[in-house]
């Protein structure tokens, strides 16, 4: 196998590992921004954190796979790194806006506490924390992939 394509599997694993760890931390830290912080038991909060972290991993996996298909970057991460990164973050962020709207306003599966900063995206009011989560976490994960996998080959 040629060198540029040899790094995709480790890059994929590193990306998901970093995303998983950072999302777990983020879910714990932004728990007070949801009403579950004051209305539910610690065990339900722990379940919510683990459940949401699992969902975050699925969003990240789907977004990365979608980005790879959209950009057709068969040599990722050595080729098409930036286009895959931008597409992944865009897909993850788009899904987050939809999911927050669906779960907060339509299904009412969860609710924001008074501490959640709110921004308006189009006509929808969304919590700032989940939006920042899908900007910051994948960006950091891509930079870890860049520093471990891409730079090792250069």
Image (spheres, helix red, strand yellow):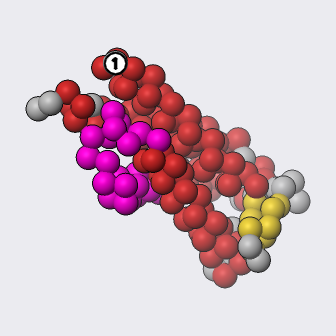
Q: In which quarter of the image is residue 154?
A: top left
* Residue that extends furthest to the left in the rendered view of this protein: 1
Residue at 82% x, 56% y: name it.
116
Q: Is mark 1 on a helix, strand or loop?
A: loop
Drawn side of residue 123 relative to residue 138, left or right:
right
Q: Nearer the viewer, residue 129 or 72?
A: 72
* Residue 78 image offset from top left, x and y in percent: 33, 33
Which residues, given as a range, are shown in magenta?
A: 59-82
- Residue 43 is a magenta residue: no
Residue 1 seen: yes
* Residue 82 image offset from top left, x and y in percent: 47, 41
Residue at 80% x, 67% y: name it.
120
Q: Nearer the viewer, residue 151 or 44?
A: 151
Q: Name the residue under label 1.
A: 154
Which SS type dominates the magenta stretch? helix
Drawn side of residue 13 relative to residue 59, left or right:
left
Q: Which of 95 and 21 is in front in this view?
A: 95
Residue at 51% x, 31% y: name it.
143
* Residue 10 image offset from top left, x and y in percent: 30, 32
């Amino acid at each position: 196998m040629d060198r540029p394509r040899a790094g995709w599997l480790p890059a994929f694993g590193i990306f998901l590992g970093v995303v998983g760890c950072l999302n777990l931390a983020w879910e714990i830290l932004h728990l007070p921004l949801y009403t579950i912080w004051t209305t539910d038991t610690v065990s339900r909060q722990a379940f919510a954190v683990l459940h949401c972290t699992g969902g975050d991993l699925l969003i990240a996996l789907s977004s990365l796979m979608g980005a790879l298909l959209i950009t057709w970057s068969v040599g990722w991460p050595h080729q098409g790194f930036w286009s895959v990164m931008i597409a992944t973050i865009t897909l993850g962020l788009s899904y987050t806006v939809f999911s927050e709207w669906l779960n907060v306003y339509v299904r009412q599966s969860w609710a924001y506490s008074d501490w959640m900063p709110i921004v308006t995206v189009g006509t929808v009011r969304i919590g700032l924390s989940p939006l920042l989560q899908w900007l910051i976490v994948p960006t950091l994960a891509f930079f870890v992939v860049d520093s471990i996998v891409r730079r090792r080959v250069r």
